[in-house]
Amino acid sequence: MARLLKGAPAAKALTERLIPQVEELKARGVVPTLAILRAGERPGDVAYENAAVKRCGKAGVAARRVTLPADCTRREILDAVDRINRDPAVHGCLLLRPLPDRETEQAVAALLDPRKDVDGMTAASLAGVFAGSGAGFPPCTAQACLEILDYYGIPLEGQRAAVIGRSLVIGKPAAMLLQARNATVTMCHTKTVDLPAVCRNAGLIVAAAGRAELVTGEFLSPGQVVLDVGVNEGPGGELLGDVKLSEAEGIVSAVTPVPGGVGAVTTAVLCAHVVRAARLLSEGAEA
Ligand code: NAP
């Protein structure tokens, strides 16, 4: 049976590493503070927001909820971002996305102060990820993939990795972060020919397609490590990953569960970014 790579221990270890850093900041009068900007009441957004607030509490990070109605205007969202930009007591901004209107999301990415962009949505953050410079903040979920691999001691150098998905939120940055650690990465998408064969030949699979149980036994081979980033609603409203866990468990050597895998680490990465943003802002440095 495959080893289940649970996210909770990795999240706990990362959170514990943050506590002394938060204490040091507080001793200097700086309370690391995250603003979470949400438009509407989508259950997935509310659940993620609640998980983020809970994780912030464990790390000693302050969290402020900024909630707008689902039918709010682009101007109202941008005004909220502007207030966050100008508030010296706020060090990080998490916009719950996707917004129904992609143009508004792009406008937020253009307006948000990159030094407060703790979920890697601005061009400056993405440039840092793509240049491999370490500047800016990678999107939290993409970095959570690396965090969970490191926690479980899974080597990346020389690893053949298949990343399913090429969004700017997960697929592309995850591929870049893996490449920066000397994995050899194939980025897969809907036009990839014979996706099962590409995946079977990889040592590491990152499934971030947003298609429930896309990755079945024919995608898998013995010895693989599989990260399941997908969060999908099953026919009965249940939560399903992109990987068919019941088939993966009997084939691969390790797999992350859904829920309780990569998603559980994402909020700890978010806190780590807020703490770093607070330190850099308080020192007047660039992200
Ligand atoms: P997205 O923007 O819809 O992108 C999906 C990507 O997957 C696209 O690049 C698409 O290819 C590719 N794809 C879709 N179906 C495919 C298929 N059958 N075969 C191969 N490639 C396929 O989604 P996203 O925002 O990246 O999110 C992906 C998943 O992660 C979702 O389930 C989302 O809910 C989940 N998620 C999880 C967390 C977490 O913390 N765990 C956080 C955020 C999101 P094309 O480019 O060709 O269209």
Image (spheres, grey):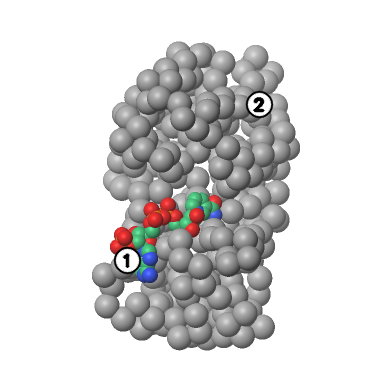
Pointer 1 local density, CA inside 10 Å: few below 14, some 14–19, many at least 20: some
Residue in view at x 64 percent, y 21 percent? 31
Report if the beta carbon of the residue with label 1 is closer than 8 angstroms to ligand 1.
Answer: yes
Q: Position of 172 compared to 236: left or right?
A: left
Residue 254 appears in which quarter of the rendering?
A: bottom right
Q: Residue at x 56, y 60 (%)?
A: 233
Which badge, 2 or 1, is on the more N-terminal residue? Answer: 2
Q: Tell me if residue 252 can be seen.
A: yes
- Examine the rendered structure and indicate whether residue 137 appears above or below residue 116: below
* C-alpha gap between disc 2 and disc 1: 38 Å
Which numbered dot is residue 62?
Answer: 2
x and y percentages locating residue 83 in the rendered image: 47, 15
User: Vertical placement of 232 versus 20: above or below?
Assistant: below
Locate the C terminus and report the quarter of the image it occupies: top left
Secondary element at tag 2: strand
Amino acid type at circle 1 is His
Disc 2 vs disc 1: which is toward the camera?
1
For the point 46% across and 20% down, the residue is 80
